[in-house]
Image: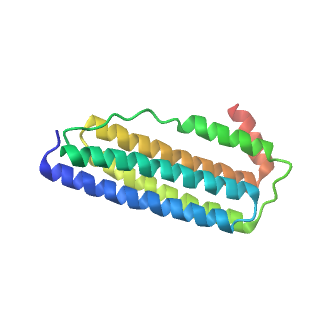
Amino acid sequence: MINKNGIDGLLESFKIALALEREGKKLFREAAEKTRSRLARQTFEYLAAEEERHIERIEEFYNALSRSGGSDIPDTADSTADEKLETFNRMLEELKDTYQSTSSDIEAYKMALDFETSTEDFYEENLKECQDAKIRKFYRWLIDEETMHSRLLRSCLRFVEDPAEWFRMRKKVL
């Protein structure tokens, strides 16, 4: 069980997490509307949907902690981030002959990457301060998810900036 001061601080950090995820969802939706390429639009729509899923999970976690005063800490399933990234990269491979890079896509990817990196950092800081194993697992899940988003965006950047290099590196991984 978490003491009163601990639960208040924890709930506050989850409120900030919710605000970050909502901001990310908005940012990705706006980027999807502004980008011209199908790849960038699909990428940002995917990321917006991912942020919505994170919002739901954080709200569930927050509500369970809030209702129980910290005595009921939900279990967290393992992240499937690696599988999702692999699926996304396979989709990129299928677009190799149809994709046309634009500078606005590159800038949008860089901006999104900066956002994801700062979100990862926030969760890492909270993980360091947390003692409870179940809460640490939840933060680890959030970090894994955000790290996957960063890796996905880096993959997109490599793909649009140098497709030949992207395919060369991809073959090394497989």
Q: Which residue appears at 69% of the width and 58% of the height? A: 41
Coloration of the structure image: rainbow
Residue 40 falls in which quadrant of the image? bottom right
Residue 58's spot in the image, x, y percent? 38, 48
Position above or below: 81 against 113: above
Q: Residue furthest left?
A: 4
Position above or below: 50 against 78: below
Q: Quadrant of the C terminus?
A: top right
Query: 27 and 104: which one is in front?
Result: 27
Q: Residue furthest right?
A: 97
Tally of numbered discs: 0
Q: Which residue appears at 58% of the width and 47% of the height? A: 151
Residue 42's spot in the image, x, y percent? 68, 53
Q: Which residue appears at 62% of the width and 57% of the height? A: 44
Q: Is residue 128 left or right of residue 142?
A: left
Q: Is residue 156 left or right of residue 142?
A: right
Q: Is residue 151 left or right of residue 169?
A: left
Position above or below: 5 against 173: below
Residue 129's spot in the image, x, y percent? 26, 48
Q: Which residue appears at 49% of the width and 56% of the height? A: 117
Residue 5's spot in the image, x, y percent? 14, 53
Q: Quadrant of the N terminus?
A: top left
Q: Is residue 39 left or right of residue 76?
A: right
